[in-house]
Image (tube, rainbow, N blue to C red):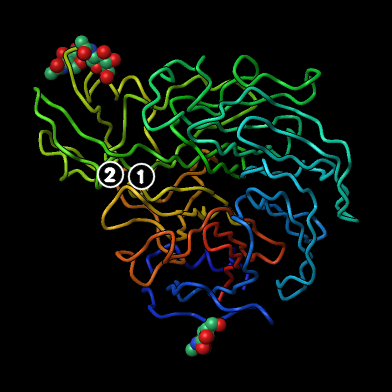
Amino acid sequence: MHLAIISTIASALVPLVYGQQNSSCPGVPGFRYGFAIDPQFRAVKVAGGLTRPRGIARDRSGRLLIVESGKGITQHAVGTDGCITGSVVLLGLASLNHGIYLSPDESKLYASTGTEVYSWSYDSTTGAVGNDQTTLVKGMRNSGHTTRTLAIPPSHPNLLVVSHGSDGNMDYPTVSPSAARAIVKVFDLNSTPAGGFDYVTQGWNAGYGLRNEVGLAFDANEMLWGVENSGDDFVRTVDGVSTDIHTDNPADELNYLGDVSKPNDQWYGYPTCYTVGGPSEIKDATFALGDQFVLAPNTTFNDTTCIQASVPPRLTLPAHSAPLDAKFDSVFQNLFVTLHGSWNRQPPSGYRVVRVPFTKANDGSFTPVAASNQVGFTDVFYPLDTTQCSAQTCTRPVAMVFDAAGRLYVTSDTSGELFLIEGA
Ligand SMILES: *[C@@H]1O[C@H](CO)[C@@H](O)[C@H](O)[C@H]1NC(C)=O
Ligand SMILES: *[C@@H]1O[C@H](CO)[C@@H](O)[C@H](O)[C@H]1NC(C)=O
Ligand SMILES: *[C@@H]1O[C@H](CO)[C@@H](O)[C@H](O)[C@H]1NC(C)=O
């Protein structure tokens, strides 16, 4: 069944079934790690043995293009059952590490390293890539968070959106957008300078104060949404007393970035204002889920200041769950989100694929069904026992792409796997 059809009946929380599902394409070994799945769906292992598979795209002939980090881009022909019928290395380029996108007309393939964005001509009929690598964007930081997610709004094929995370956990200079980190920027490919745009000084902003907005998705109005990896090891200091609040704080985030065809110079809070993920863990004040807080309130800047100064998320995601991709289903009733999984939390969080039910408001805009102070997602694919999860024991979902039949392909980097989620 098409996922979009499922979504129409799935807005209410459904009971979840536990137990290992064990389905894989012919000749492909089963999943490396056990998992549970919402009974409306089933998961099929499509490939194993990939080299840190990260970003994934699909051309209109149905081929899958996967960034295997440290290797390049591999291309996979797919049969009607969704299984792979043949694979080739399309581009051997070890520096590619995450971002991949096809231009809306599929005549160009874009991919990123930590420091640059490249284009190649692409033929979606034959699957051939041109020998014409061109640098579109350069000058990005080669340290800290180095995934450079790419996106293009379908009706503005000239606008290349490039996300750039912070350099490390606390990157204080990013309080100014001129630092050009912890930011999402937009470049007009109709006026690409020779040698490419300088990321720091050129382009315009699609929001800043975004610590590490790895997942980007356009809704049906081509408004941009982002999922954010927030900070680690947080301690809150009030009147000289410091308390560890890091288990459930800060929340990871789902942010509304809006229309990328014009500058969005709003500040989304990093590195000063954060989102409460566990109100009870912050004992010096009364908070609700989704409220904004600062690490060390003082007389000039405190939690209340954040209400005036920064744009809060539209929805919280669990602390340290590490959202890496977001994809709307074809009818924009669910935003699927990969939660790669935590390292900075005991017990662990994430290691799953969730969906956020969305609705169209009276004004035509899209919004999560849940309010910002509610838990607004439901598990789709998740570990049997999250408390035991590590990179060596659980699937780590990274990036997703839907096919024409509504099947959702998902990469898992540390396990080297590709699987699909489809209607049960
Ligand atoms: C599940 O898959 C694994 C690996 O392919 C296999 O060893 C095992 O026998 C399967 N279990 C069931 C119940 O089919
Ligand atoms: C909080 O900060 C604001 C300035 O943003 C200030 O006016 C207010 O007095 C501060 N509140 C406290 C309790 O310090
Ligand atoms: C008050 O907090 C803000 C935000 O964290 C910080 O920029 C500022 O330096 C602090 N002021 C003092 C006097 O510590």
Q: Position of residue 273 (x, y in %)?
A: 31, 27
Q: Are marks 1 and 2 in contact (CB under 8 Å)?
A: yes
Dot 1 amino acid type = Thr
| Residue 332 in the image: above or below residue 422 | above
Q: Position of residue 217 (x, y in %)?
A: 58, 43
Residue at position x 12%, y 34% from top?
Answer: 285
Count neighbours of disc 1 (C-alpha within 10 A) and say few if under 14, some if 14 to 19, many if 20 or more: many
Which quadrant is the N terminus positioned in? bottom right
Question: Picture quarter containing residue 385?
Answer: bottom left
Q: Position of residue 28 (x, y in %)?
A: 65, 77
Q: Could you say which is closer to the camera, residue 417 or residue 104?
A: 417
Residue at position x 56%, y 39% from top?
Answer: 147
Residue at position x 46%, y 28% from top?
Answer: 167
Dot 2 amino acid type = Gly
Residue at position x 59%, y 55% from top?
Answer: 52
Q: Which residue is mark 2?
A: 277
Q: Which residue is mark 1?
A: 316
